[in-house]
Amino acid sequence: MERVDHLAHERNKSEFDVDAMKIVWAGSPHAFELSDRISKLVASDPGFRKDNRTMLSRKDLFKNTLRKAAYAWKTIVDLHLSEEEAAKLRFYVDEPAYTDLHWGMFVPAIKGQGTDEQQQKWLPLAYKMQIIGCYAQTELGHGSNVQGLETTATFDPQTDEFIIHSPTLTSSKWWPGGLGKVATHAIAYARLIVGGRDYGVNGFIVQLRSLEDHSPLPGITVGDIGMKFGNGAYNTMDNGVLQFDHVRIPRDQMLMRVSQVTREGKYKQSDVPRQLVYGTMVYVRQTIVADASCALSRAVCIATRYSAVRRQFGSQNGGPETQVIDYKTQQSRLFPLLASAYAFRFIGEWLKWLYTDVTQRLQANDFSTLPEAHACTAGLKSLTTTATADGIEECRKLCGGHGYLCSSGLPELFAVYVPACTYEGDNTVLLLQVARFLMKTVSQLGVKKPVGTIGYMTRVDHLMQCRCGVQRAEDWLNPSALLEAFEARAARMSVACAQNLSNFDNPEEGFAELSADLVEAAVAHCQLIIVSKFIEKLQQEIPGKGVKQQLEVLCNIYTLFLLHKHQGDFLSTGCITPKHASLANDQLRSLYSQVRPNAIALVDAFNYTDHFLGSILGCYDGNVYPKLYEAAWEDPLNDSVVPDGYHQYIRPLLKQQIRTARL
Amino acid sequence: MERVDHLAHERNKSEFDVDAMKIVWAGSPHAFELSDRISKLVASDPGFRKDNRTMLSRKDLFKNTLRKAAYAWKTIVDLHLSEEEAAKLRFYVDEPAYTDLHWGMFVPAIKGQGTDEQQQKWLPLAYKMQIIGCYAQTELGHGSNVQGLETTATFDPQTDEFIIHSPTLTSSKWWPGGLGKVATHAIAYARLIVGGRDYGVNGFIVQLRSLEDHSPLPGITVGDIGMKFGNGAYNTMDNGVLQFDHVRIPRDQMLMRVSQVTREGKYKQSDVPRQLVYGTMVYVRQTIVADASCALSRAVCIATRYSAVRRQFGSQNGGPETQVIDYKTQQSRLFPLLASAYAFRFIGEWLKWLYTDVTQRLQANDFSTLPEAHACTAGLKSLTTTATADGIEECRKLCGGHGYLCSSGLPELFAVYVPACTYEGDNTVLLLQVARFLMKTVSQLGVKKPVGTIGYMTRVDHLMQCRCGVQRAEDWLNPSALLEAFEARAARMSVACAQNLSNFDNPEEGFAELSADLVEAAVAHCQLIIVSKFIEKLQQEIPGKGVKQQLEVLCNIYTLFLLHKHQGDFLSTGCITPKHASLANDQLRSLYSQVRPNAIALVDAFNYTDHFLGSILGCYDGNVYPKLYEAAWEDPLNDSVVPDGYHQYIRPLLKQQIRTARL
């Protein structure tokens, strides 16, 4: 195929230093160098091919994933990659596999919840992959509510063992990745029962399979839970089902950093503060937010490039049709998503800082910022994953019919991404947690000073009565006008909810009854966090010709898009008038025109390889149609010109022999 | 498995006559009887099993679809089913297949665009399936813009033939269902070239494959375009690619009802009015709206039943946890979708009437209502398909983690449904057509009297200045208050757009620049149509205990939900005040409580068999968990306890032999 850059005219239009933007996107020159090097290493190695993934049957797909996971490990070992490099490599291999859970959940759980002795025993085995672990928490009947788990771990003082048991069908472990077919060990969560008393849920290290022949150990029933959404996608993962039938493990396989059971059968809590678990939660959610910006930016990159290639309508005098990216309807759907990808990138970066801050405070026994950090990360996880899932699907629709082809990459990206809205806290449940924090903050105003991301509530009196000073559309470019509007909206929605709650005799009943409104208040608060951190980012110095200007345009698009989308909130709380809303809309339109010439360069700045994007519509050179045409012939149905089944099922119709056909 | 109705307690709560509601949903006792009988016939025949669909490889899947299509035809022939019954049978087989295009596009195209002689020649062949047809319009580079098609049909006066040719790669036919592997004939759309002159796009009957051995005829390159979104889903269909290399067809295979080419090579237009094509468009879009209500109601049925089965949190004193359907956050997402399903059902019914009305007028050469009917059907197609696609995905999320399993039925329902947002007119393009009609209506006010669904614009003076009279939450139950608010909002948004347009010197430039606002005005107009027809429906007598009351609750939920969702529109146009919005929200919450005890019965009224639903989470008896557990073991990965690939790709890791492993 010819090697012409069909998007060169677009790239030539851009008004900023793309290489400098790449560094900003990556976070640092080091991060850029690392990502660039490892992503190219993966892309250039045929062992990591993934373009046939959506055509494989479940068994072939899974076997191929096993091969890739082993090949990735071999590459890591052969090239002596550092831990950081190894993690990046797994990331760019871009295929959910049991290793995600081994490295991302099993190892951290032992580190976080194991005693020093337990860590010394188990971590070296895990680091060398002499054992492969998974994280078995959720059950068939129990997901979000961890305290509702039914699996039991009963201490037997006679033998100094725990008996792990699944007392009901609904207590079957269900969903853990890597469990179905691969993991040799699990961290299994179970109710600790000692001397007939239930001490709540604890973690236990349980061996599941023989290290000799991989067969399940006695008392273990284990398998895969079946197909999940989409082609390829998460079907590369063996999410599993697991039942324990009185499985015995030694006492020292209970993770005992926080609480212990002694030889004598005494339950004890250590002096390790329970709040440590929040540190892990902040860490995990930070990675989820980072993943959101990555997934959304991939979809946006595909849709933006294809929108510049695709032409439809508007041909004049037989000339070429109009690039669909030039339609305002396309821009008003696409560019806010482009801006969101950048906004989520920066909030993810900030969350990394927050994690460091929380960790340092925990080490100094300062738990004061934990509730705020917890609410903030819960809310940001919810907001960014919901927006990303919706945004990927929107990008798919923006690619018209061809977005529906697997070769566009978007169906698989969507299918593999959407679980993020449910795992690690269902998004609605998380927003209710944020709302609870907001209501507590309002009720304690004057008593306790709000800090961090809720700090704006110290100015609640002002925010309840301030008036928007915008008079011309350009005034909406003023960061303080934007910030005040978002702060006022968030504050007023929280205060209104708190007032409505006070009309109920039973606060819990009130909270339940008003929960839909509370969720909206939580969203307003979380959107403010993202907006304010984006604005803060732009108060720093950012090198590179035109880079900061582009980011300012994106920040304004993100903010004004939210303002337009949620204008009902802003208007009903009186934060702005219809006139202000209309000016904001005018300003938004003009910002779209500013971003248009830079759109391709702004997605080039993500620095994604064609391998990682996995999309014909999004390929760097824009040579879409010949590649689509070529790819079609790869489908297994095209192995033969006359399809399998013709003689049995088509010919009898055409030959009017249907009555006697064997079907 | 035990045969207990786990939802009996829910069914006992309902306050209305479910059987009477089934008739209302079906449209008539006849329609109910037909659907009920045929759906049960399909459900009880193992030949139509579909529960393994998402696990099959593409080839096995497709072959199985060929079998089912033949089996369906055999059933139709054996049982002497009427045309109406045959169509219902294909519907309940519920698997996209080439027959959809044969019966739904190929046959109607010949009927609509063929001359009497052409119909006499081709229809009997098609009716008996001696030939199988497809509808080849879209091309690799051309979708929505039919006038941009590149395929040519050049008249050769020497041989009295047309030469069908694909001059470029982008002119390859791309997407037509049934084309890839099955169809023997196509209605191919091509630019008619006679004597060097381009007469625009016309339809031609072209044979593609030999009727003897199914091999493509000379000059025909044809194949499948590859995998599409989702497991199972549309991958049962052979959407195809087709290139013509100077393929010759006799002159009489041009569809000549509207325009002809004579033996002498003269192009003529018949006196058959071109507007006839709009009749077909109204018909096709009416079926799409009916399909929307069907797809959305399936998803809602699954999510509602599962929400009553699933329990999470809220356990008191060790008792059972709370049914998730009792959470207001769940209700505020689920019940508006339940109400939407009913709203779309009734607007679909009304569109059937509109089609009859339009047809009768066309026959009487009355074209006066065509622009309004065209705008109305375009808008309703767009609105209902977008809401349905989003609604299915929302239902999936409402089922938590288990909604992500294929056995929930929701991933496939989503994947198979979403193309409706793109085909038969991209939804955004359609809304712009509505907007154009609205702007024309506004500009002609006082000159031309608006009729039908745009009739409210005769009262534009009143609507521009009326004030909402709601004083208490209950006042929002008054249909005229609701109607006036929606009319005022739609009218004011249209008028505002028209005013903004008038500021542009070039109206087309203005239309392009303001297109995002115009789309919002079009949405407001279309929502009004659905609301007003739902309200009209309730002015009829509706038999059955409590049936009408339930529908009134649903109508109010649908309307107030829209009002809440779009309160920015209502507030910014001054149609309501923040106080009114807040009262509407209060009323909405209380309506959710009213619908709660009837929720299960309201989805039972759809009368869907478990076969048609195809969802473990949505099964009638609510016995979800044992069925999920059983289904898991059916996955091919569970064929063996130790997975294929263990020896090559897992054992070398565990045994520390990765360096020497062959991967």
Image (cartoon, coloured by chain):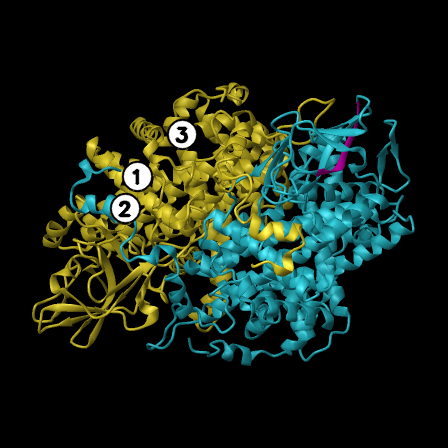
Chain colours: A cyan, B yellow
List x then y, in percent, for residue B115: 13, 55
Bounds of the magenta segment: A197-206
Pick the residue in front: B274 or B470.
B274
Quadrant occupied by the C terminus of chain A: top left
Which of the marked residues, 2 or 3, is nearer the chain's N terminus?
A: 2
- The image shows residue B242, relative to residue B627, as above or below, that is below
Pick the residue in front: A303 or A560.
A303
| Dot 3: element | loop
Identity, as a three-letter code, of the amino acid under mark 1: Arg
Q: Residues within 10 Å of mark 2 (few under 14, many from 20)?
A: many
Q: Quadrant of residue B472?
A: top right
To which residue does mark 2 refer? Answer: B99
Pick the residue in front: B603 or B466.
B603
Q: Is residue B492 magenta?
A: no
To which residue does mark 3 refer? Answer: B609
Identity, as a three-letter code, of the amino acid under mark 3: Thr
List x then y, in percent, for residue A605: 62, 71
Q: Residues within 10 Å of mark 3 (few under 14, many from 20)?
A: some
| Mark pair 3, 1: CA separation | 15 Å
